[in-house]
Structures are given as structure tokens and as C-alpha cells.
Image: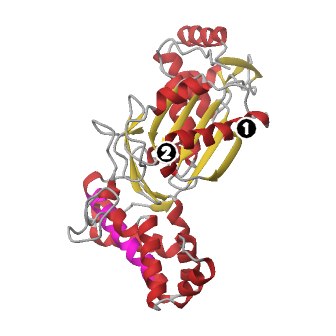
């Protein structure tokens, strides 16, 4: 079913819609306290939003004495689709206009299978959500992919861990399939938007969100908005070089952070430890399963295996080395660590913190929290597309 969602006519209506999205149902008086509009202008803009169906009445507000104000809320029929494609899995969720998740499915997936196969799986998961009653239509969709994206066109550009995706018109193709507006972004930018919407960064206008997984990236939020750079490659910290003589990276260069501590690098080094006999715990797991995963490293470290612990701590120090440079340059108010490798536990976070606090200047780190993320990227995907829908044409 093709979306026919109206759009706000001006910046005042867009501001009102975003307030109702983020704060829930509000009285006209409460909205008036949030925006710099005269009472008559506010009433006019709300009435226009009611006429378009983007906003609906929601009963009487709580009494403050005198005449009671009427509540309004954003239309509960609006539906947004969030898709977060990782290197090894995909999350798909449906939200309402207040970005509450109404349905969520996830499954393993190999992004190296290419865009056609991956989006066949995505559309199958979307079909499951529709069958479950989460949505009959979508008013917009946000999609994240684990690589650099030319944002205006929604096209991945030379993504190192996504063979076959270079130049694929994700935004155009999925908009045709879903019948609604689509925006495409790097997955870590969506993680940052999710934390800003419903996680640890809700009141922080300037922060970094680092995703540690098969790839490593950083979402940069400045003044409340995602900074993507001129071409969309801002935050590609996994390919900052630590050592020109280091291991070869998937990008073709050597000594990148990702080549030392991305998910594949962690498995590579853990397998070497197991085969050399330096880690009895990992050797046992390798013999049992025939291959190792980051979860095996986490379990071995939790069991007190010294070699596995050292592997985690070294990865944390290297990651902290890069983050320390970012902190010295950007001076954020918060650093959020997310992604699959956060399952390695407290030792990883402690190593990152220690390196950053040791390496960056005291003025930058004196009141700098470095914390684990709380929110899935699909929430950020829904936030991305809702920002677009709730903007003037």
C-alpha cells in the first residue's frame, strides 16, 4: 500500500510535530510554552495540522484552574519502518509516530551475499511484521548499512565489508518496493540517533557513538544533529591507521584499527591463540565447534582465561587510542560504545576508558562519561525517517 502521508507546510508545523513525537500528547498550553509563537499563530498551525490528519485530538488536559485546555497528539495511525543491516544479522522494526516499537524481528544474515539477496530477506521480514498486524502500510522507512553511504542519494560507496554493494541504489529500490519515502545511512549514525532518541544521549547535544562489530565506525553528533561530512564518510574510524606495518585490512590498506580489533580480526587472533596452545579455553571451544566466534572469546575471558583476557584488553587499548584522538579533537560531552563486541564485557570498556583518560587532556576528560549504549539501531532508523517526514517539503 503506497503512503500518502501529508507533510508539514512550514517550519512551525515541523517543530510542533517533532515535539509531539518526542514528548507524547500535549496540551496547547504546554506546546505554547515550548515554541515562540503567538497564541493565535499557534492555534492556527495546530488547526492546520488537525485538518491534514497529522495531528488528532486527545481529550482534555489536566486542570490547572480555569478553562481546561485540549490535548493533541501525533496521529496514532502513522507507521515507520526501521531496518538495521549489519555484517552478520539484520533487525527490522515497525514503530508508531512516537517511535515506540510495535513489532521487531531479527535474524542472522551475511551482508556479503549482496544487496539483492539481503533485501529479499528484509522484505520477507517486513511481510512477517505485516502479517502479525504491526502495520498495513508505511509512511516512511529508514535503512542502515555497515559501510559508507552517499547520503543524499542513499547509495553505498566502496564499502570494505560489503562486496557487491558499491553504487547499489538502495534508497530508490526500496522506496519502489515499500511504496514510501526511504532514507539510507551508515548503521553507526542510526545507532547514534537511537541513543539520542531513547537512550543514554537524550540530553547531550555533542557526543560520539562508537560501534564495535565486524566493522568499526563512529557516529558524530554536533549540536543535536548527525555530522556526515561533505561526502558522507565522516566517522569511518575503523580505517584510521595505527601502524603502517600492521595486518592487512579488508579495505586493502594495512594497520587499520579494524584490522586489529574488528570482529574478524578478533576471531583470527583467538584462533591463533587456540591453535598455539596459549589458550586452553579457546582450544577446547575450537575443537568442539570447529570455529570460534567473538562470543567464545567473551566466554573464555569470563572464565578467567588469561590469553583471552589479554586479547580483549589489547583490543580495548587500541580502540581507546583512536577514541582518545577523537576526544582531544572534538571534546564531546559523552562517548557511547555499542555494537556486538560490547558483549566482551567490562574488561573491554575498562580498557577503553583507561586509555582515553590517560591519553586525552584533562580538560577534555575531566567530566567525560564513556558508557555502553542501550538502544537498537532500528529506533535510530525510525528517527531518521521521521525527521524527514516531519520536515517542510
Q: Nearer the viewer, mark 2 or mark 1?
A: 2
Q: In this orientation, which residue lies closer to the viewer: 19 or 299?
A: 299
Residue 377 in the image: above or below residue 129 = below
Location of residue 72 in the rendering, given as x and y in whole percent from the top left corner:
69, 21
Dominant secondary structure of the residues highlighted in magenta in the image: helix
Colour convention of the picture? secondary structure
Q: Secondary structure at mark 2?
A: loop
Residue count near mark 2 (Cα–Cα under 10 Å), binned few <14, some 14–19, many ≥20? some
Count neighbours of disc 1 (C-alpha within 10 A) and say few if under 14, some if 14 to 19, many if 20 or more.
many
Q: Residue at x 55, y 45 (%)?
A: 84
Q: Nearer the viewer, residue 387 or 162?
A: 162
Residue 326 horizontal side relative to residue 333, left or right: left
Vertical placement of residue 162 versus 156, above or below: below
Q: Which callout, 2 or 1, points at the residue further toward the start of the chain? A: 2
Residue matched to label 2: 114
Q: Is residue 179 above or below residue 239?
A: above
Residues tagged 2 and 1 counted as in contact (Cβ below 8 A): no
Residue at 54% in and 56% down: 88
The residue identified by callout 1 is 129
Q: CA distance from mark 2 to mark 1?
A: 23 Å
Q: Position of residue 121 (x, y in %)?
A: 62, 43
Q: Is residue 321 magenta?
A: yes
Q: Which image quadrant is residue 233 in?
A: top left
Question: In screen coordinates, is 149 left or right of 143?
Answer: left
Q: Give SS at disc 1.
A: helix
Residue span colored magenta: 310-328
Amino acid at each position: 500500500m503506497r503512503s500518502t502521508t501529508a507533510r508539514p507546510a512550514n517550519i512551525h508545523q515541523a517543530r510542533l510535530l517533532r515535539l509531539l513525537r518526542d514528548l507524547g500528547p500535549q496540551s496547547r498550553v504546554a506546546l505554547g510554552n515550548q515554541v515562540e509563537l503567538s497564541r493565535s499563530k499557534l492555534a492556527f498551525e495546530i488547526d492546520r495540522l488537525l485538518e491534514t490528519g497529522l495531528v488528532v485530538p486527545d481529550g482534555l488536559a489536566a486542570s490547572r484552574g480555569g478553562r481546561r485546555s485540549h490535548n493533541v497528539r501525533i496521529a496514532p495511525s502513522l507507521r515507520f519502518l526501521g531496518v538495521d543491516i549489519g555484517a552478520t544479522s539484520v533487525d527490522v522494526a515497525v514503530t508508531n509516530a512516537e517511535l515506540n516499537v510495535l513489532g521487531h524481528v531479527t535474524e542472522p544474515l551475511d551482508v556479503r551475499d549482496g544487496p539483492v539477496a539481503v533485501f529479499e530477506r528484509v522484505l520477507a521480514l517486513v511481510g512477517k511484521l505485516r502479517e502479525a498486524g504491526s502495520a498495513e502500510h508505511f509512511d516512511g522507512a529508514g535503512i542502515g548499512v555497515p559501510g559508507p553511504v552517499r547520503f543524499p542519494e542513499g547509495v553505498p560507496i566502496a564499502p570494505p565489508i560489503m562486496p557487491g554493494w558499491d553504487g547499489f541504489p538502495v534508497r530508490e529500490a526500496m522506496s519502489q518496493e515499500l511504496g514510501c519515502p526511504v532514507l539510507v545511512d551508515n548503521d553507526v549514525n542510526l545507532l547514534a540517533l537511537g541513543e539520542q532518541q531513547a537512550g543514554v544521549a537524550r540530553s547531550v547535544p555533542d557526543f560520539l557513538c562508537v560501534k564495535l562489530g565486524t566493522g568499526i565506525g563512529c557516529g558524530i553528533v554536533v549540536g543535536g544533529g548527525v555530522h556526515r561530512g561533505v561526502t558522507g564518510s565522516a566517522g569511518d574510524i575503523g580505517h584510521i591507521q595505527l601502524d603502517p606495518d600492521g595486518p592487512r585490512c579488508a579495505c586493502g590498506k594495512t594497520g587499520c584499527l579494524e584490522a586489529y580489533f574488528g570482529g574478524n580480526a578478533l576471531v583470527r587472533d583467538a584462533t591463533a591463540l587456540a591453535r598455539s596452545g596459549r589458550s586452553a579455553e579457546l582450544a577446547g571451544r575450537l575443537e568442539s565447534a570447529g570455529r570460534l566466534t567473538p562470543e567464545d572469546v567473551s566466554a573464555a575471558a569470563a572464565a578467567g582465561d588469561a590469553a583471552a583476557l589479554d586479547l580483549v584488553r589489547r583490543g580495548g587499548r587500541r580502540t581507546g587510542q583512536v577514541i582518545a584522538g577523537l576526544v582531544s579533537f572534538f571534546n564531546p560531552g559523552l562517548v557511547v560504545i555499542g555494537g556486538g563486541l560490547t558483549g566482551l564485557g567490562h574488561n573491554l570498556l575498562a580498557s577503553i576508558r583507561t586509555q582515553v583518560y590517560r591519553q586525552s587532556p584533562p580538560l577534555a576528560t575531566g567530566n567525560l562519561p564513556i558508557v555502553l549504549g542501550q538502544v537498537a539501531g532500528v529506533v535510530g532508523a525510525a528517527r531518521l525517517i521521521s525527521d524527514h517526514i516531519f520536515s517542510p517539503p
